[in-house]
Amino acid sequence: MDKVVGITAVCSRVSKDYVRTKLPDGSFQPEEYALGKGGRLDGSFRDPSFDNSRFIDIARAVTGPLAAQNYRPAKKPDTEKLLIMVYWGTTIVPDPMSMSPAWTGLNNEIGPKTDVQQLGQLYTDDIMRNQIDKKNAMVLGYDSDGSAGSDGISAALHRGELRAELEDSRYYVVLLAFDFQAFRTEKKHKLLWETRFSIQEARNLFDKALPVMTQYASAYFGQDSHGLVRTKVPEGKVLIGEPRSLGEVEAPQK
């Protein structure tokens, strides 16, 4: 399965203290960075294409797209402007309501004679479902969506579509870019920008999907996406440049 399918979603936020300098030709002034291993989170299902993924695999995938935005690996240990922490994983998804014992016991119907205890169980199941959805939304950047549209049917359909994506397992990568000098000299965790991007796990393989969603997300590295940006994966190939050796640093202590 070489073809990558589905919706790629990106959310990128930038601190008001972070401003990139533009050169006369319109490109951004280069900034040096070091990559740090943030960590991996395994989701609800075993996935051979993801289970063996390593930090170096993610580092190789993001190096070329970062370079396209004039972010360059630091040549010396003390010249980095950014410490970019890398997190990746698959989301943990809630069980469908149809799997709830209470819902099954009700024969999928709620009426005047519905048992109060069963209704209470359904209510509890829905609360747990909403909690999982909320956590996924925060990880993927869906909590920042500002494109719900107008009130009414279109908005309801849009929210339903987003919720359906949240309740499908998704591969994701999160890049958190900290001020490295502030971290080194003052031990301050000053977040300058973050980019969160994801794609559905179903019918995809992580090693194939990773460069595709990274390439799409790269346009927002260090830039504000102004909410959630979603697009269908286009047909074609994504070419990633030759990987370079990268140093590894420890994750900042939270």
Image (spheres, helix red, strand yellow):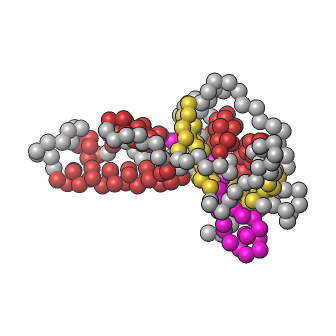
On screen, residue 74 above or below 27: below
Q: Nearer the viewer, residue 201 or 46?
A: 201
Write the start and end of the magenta stretch as one range: 166-193
Res 40 seen here: no
Q: Residue furthest right?
A: 76
Q: Nearer the viewer, residue 67 or 119?
A: 67
Specify whether residue 176 is painted magenta. yes
Q: Residue furthest front?
A: 24
Left or right of 166? Residue 222 is: right
Residue found 27% across the figure and 50% down from its top: 122
Estimate the x, y position of residue 153 in percent, counting from the top left.
32, 35
Q: Quadrant of the C terminus?
A: bottom right
In the picture, residue 172 is in which quadrant? Answer: top right
Specify whether residue 35 is painted magenta. no
Left or right of 91? Residue 56 is: right
On screen, residue 120 above or below 216: below
Estimate the x, y position of residue 218 in percent, counting from the top left.
68, 42
Q: Nearer the viewer, residue 9 or 221?
A: 221
Res 128 seen here: yes
Estimate the x, y position of residue 34 in percent, counting from the top left.
78, 57
Q: Residue furthest left?
A: 112
Estimate the x, y position of residue 95 in percent, counting from the top left.
40, 44
Q: How many numbered discs, if any? A: 0
